[in-house]
Image (cartoon, rainbow, N blue to C red):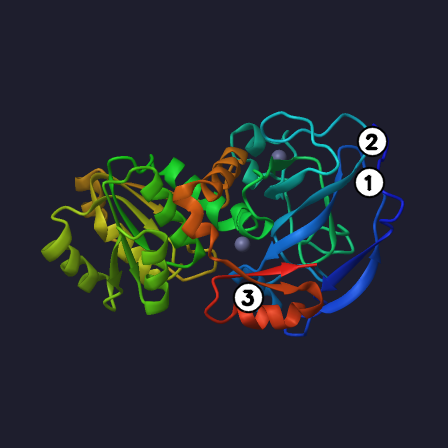
Amino acid sequence: MPDTREPSVATARIALLVAPGRPLELRDAPVPPLGGGEVLVRIVACAVCGSDLHTARGRRPHPLPTILGHEITGTVVALGSGAGVVDVAGAAVACGDRVTWSVCASCGECDRCRGGLPQKCRRLLKYGHVSNDDHPLAGGFASHIVLRCGTAIVRLPAGLSADAAATASCAVATAAAILRVGGGARGRSVIVLGAGMLGLSVVSQAMACGASSVTVVESRPDRLELARAVAPTANTVPWPGDPAALERLFGGVMLTDGADLVIEAGGTAELVQAAVRLVATGGTCVLAGTVAPVGDVAIDPERLVRRQATIHGVHNYLPEDLAAAVVHLASPTGAALAALAGPAMPLESINEALVAAAGTAVRVVVTP
Ligand SMILES: [Zn+2]
Ligand SMILES: [Zn+2]
């Protein structure tokens, strides 16, 4: 198939992080020639993730200069030459398709890809996490992006807005992976520790999957309020200050033997400790919130042995999880979660958008 790019798409507008702690710089950049199997997408929406804020402020190492943003939706405007590109369902991708895609592009050939962990590919490219010099147009705070080979592409249903769908490729898909790895939520008691976008996504999907109960623990009252909006029948518990206090609270009031599935989605050492303490006999604990160092965490191994408990770590997701995330956001049970996207702000106001994202909004959306 020839490069079918519109002749008009010669330059893209990008917001470039040149140095940590500095405002992003808006520039025009040439659109590179498409390689075989690559896809040029005109970005419609890119949600601001907490990790974007950490990187912009220089709180974690990152290749520079870079285009941040990895929770993206857009419209296909050109296809590279070679064999046709297909989406996760195996259907050909065509110009005009409304799509989202995996945060990672994987080689499909290394031991990890072949072993079922493409998100840990040895030649991984992660959108919004690479140098723009090495990988031009690979981030979401821009007018266009080039999707590389090995990207899982998912078409958007007609009823799902681009803004809402932008959250699929990070928190919502990771939540789908958490529930898959954790053995599913149907008929099980579920505790979710932390109610940021990841925790809220778990709560919404656990409810939709038919969990027998869902309990959310969170220190911020505004986030507990969001949890009630996402899942009105969920139990909401203010974080009592330490893991032992939380265990006493649950032991005395809600559960005699912990929960079948406990998910840590907050990223602190105390929440990890609490998660391990709360898992029931035969139950599963999934740790997913800790994506920055928190130091060593003390756990009681005897408790885990006697309870025959399982602990999993989950980071990112498989293509099938992204497809499930999009289906969930488009479903009636996912509508309240989808409604968390916003407010929308223009790319030209990217630095104001980052400030807004550091406030109470769960997912500010940048629109070129
Ligand atoms: Zn993210
Ligand atoms: Zn690989």
Query: Farthest residue in the front direction?
Result: 159
Tell me which numbered mark, 2 or 1, is placed earlier along the sequence.
1
- How far is the residue under mark 1 from the one under mark 3? 31 Å
Q: Amino acid at mark 1?
A: Leu
- Quadrant containing ligand 2 reads top right
Report x, y in % for residue 65: 73, 62
Report x, y in % for residue 203: 35, 49
- Tell me the residue that label 3 is attached to: 54
Q: Residues within 10 Å of mark 1 (few under 14, many from 20)?
A: some
Q: Which residue is pictured at 42% across the width and 56% down the height? A: 290
* Mark number, residue 81: 2
- Tell me the residue that label 1 is attached to: 34
- Pick whichever, 330 or 205, lies toward us: 330
Q: Residues within 10 Å of mark 2 (few under 14, many from 20)?
A: some
Q: Amino acid at mark 3?
A: His
> In which quadrant will I find the C terminus?
bottom right
Q: CB atoms at circles 2 and 1 under 8 Å apart?
A: yes
Q: CB atoms at circles 1 and 3 under 8 Å apart?
A: no
